[in-house]
Amino acid sequence: MTGHAILDGIRATLQSNHITGVGSNPKIGLWGYSGGGAATQIAVEMQESYAPELEIAGAAMGGLSSLTKASDIFSINKGPSAALIPAALLGLASQHPELQKSIDQSLKPEWREYFYTPLHQCLQESTVLFQYQDVLGMFHNESIPGLTAELTKAWNDETEHRASKIKAPLYVYQSVIDHLSSIEGIDALVRDYCAQGFNVHYERANAPNLSHVKYGILGAPGAISWLQDRLDGKKASRGCLYHPDTTSTLDPDMAALYPMNISYALYGVVSSSV
């Protein structure tokens, strides 16, 4: 559904001149980080089969997931980002009734209201509420195999429509200490893209202070600059380019784009120990 929504959104935009003033043949770019990076990845992987008429000048995606199967999400249980487990389950359940049924049948009654709170609050609030919680412990233990099976079915249904060829040049950026992803998994993903002949610029951030959230901020200027070159008509490098990103501080030019209170907040996040 995610990839379809993005590609259909582009199609709709191309037909919106009477509303938006967008021309009939604009340069198209995609950019996303974390959940947005996953959405961008799905869209470019299925574009050739679902929307071959679109010409995407470039796609930048960072903070990617290294999950290879649905149940890998359970590896973050009892961790700082455990909130992503209910968020993922409930998100998929909204489109897959059998998974929804399995969740309802598997949850212990005393945890039901708590588990459903991500539907009514932002991710940051959910992160605070669920961090280091035993989310799997909110389910009847004997129900977890069945719940996992329904999760796997939903996951496979959402990911089986990807194309085998990516037409757009890619910019991939990832921190080596991202706690949500194995850097080895992302390295393997990039190697696979390169082996298939895709054009990939890979920024592999090695600074020791770059958490998932921090690199979402610090890595943005590089992604924007690369994507702007594509939108300006500059050709991306052919083949694969690996580059060690040593960024560890916030680009002042980026901070200056925001009101002062937001700039201060960004500096606060980057300088924190989390």
Image (cartoon, rainbow, N blue to C red):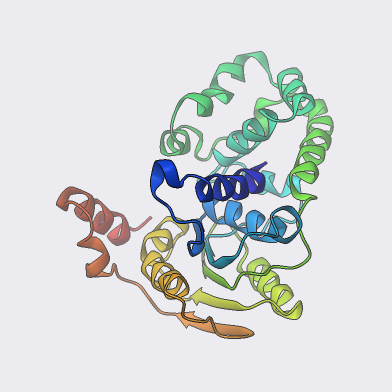
Is residue 175 visible in this depiction of the protein? no
Q: Is residue 141 visible?
A: yes
Q: Residue at x 48, y 61 (%)?
A: 26
Question: Residue 9, position in %: x, y?
Answer: 56, 45
Where is 270 relative to 103, above or below?
Answer: below
Where does the N terminus fall, quadrant-wise?
Answer: top right
Q: Residue furthest top?
A: 109
Residue 18 at x, y percent in the picture: 43, 43
Q: Seen in the image, is 45 located left or right of residue 118?
A: right
Looking at the image, is 133 positioned above or below residue 158? Answer: above
**Which residue is at 52% across, 82% downward?**
235
Left or right: 63 in relation to 182: left
Is 3 on the left-hand or right-hand side of 98?
A: left
- Front-lying residue, 50 or 274: 50
Q: Nearer the viewer, residue 226 or 99?
A: 226
Which quadrant does the C terminus fall into?
A: bottom left
> Residue 203's spot in the image, x, y percent?
51, 76
Give the quadrant of residue 172.
bottom right
Q: Nearer the viewer, residue 196 or 125?
A: 196
| Placement of 95 over or under 202, stated as above or below | above
Give x and y (percent) for residue 116: 57, 23
Please state the total of marks drawn on the protein image: 0
Q: Nearer the viewer, residue 28 or 122?
A: 28
Looking at the image, which residue sits at the far left?
260
Q: Quadrant of residue 44?
A: bottom right
Q: What residue is shown at x 56% (from left), y 17% (from top)?
A: 113
Residue at point 37% right, 75% down? 247
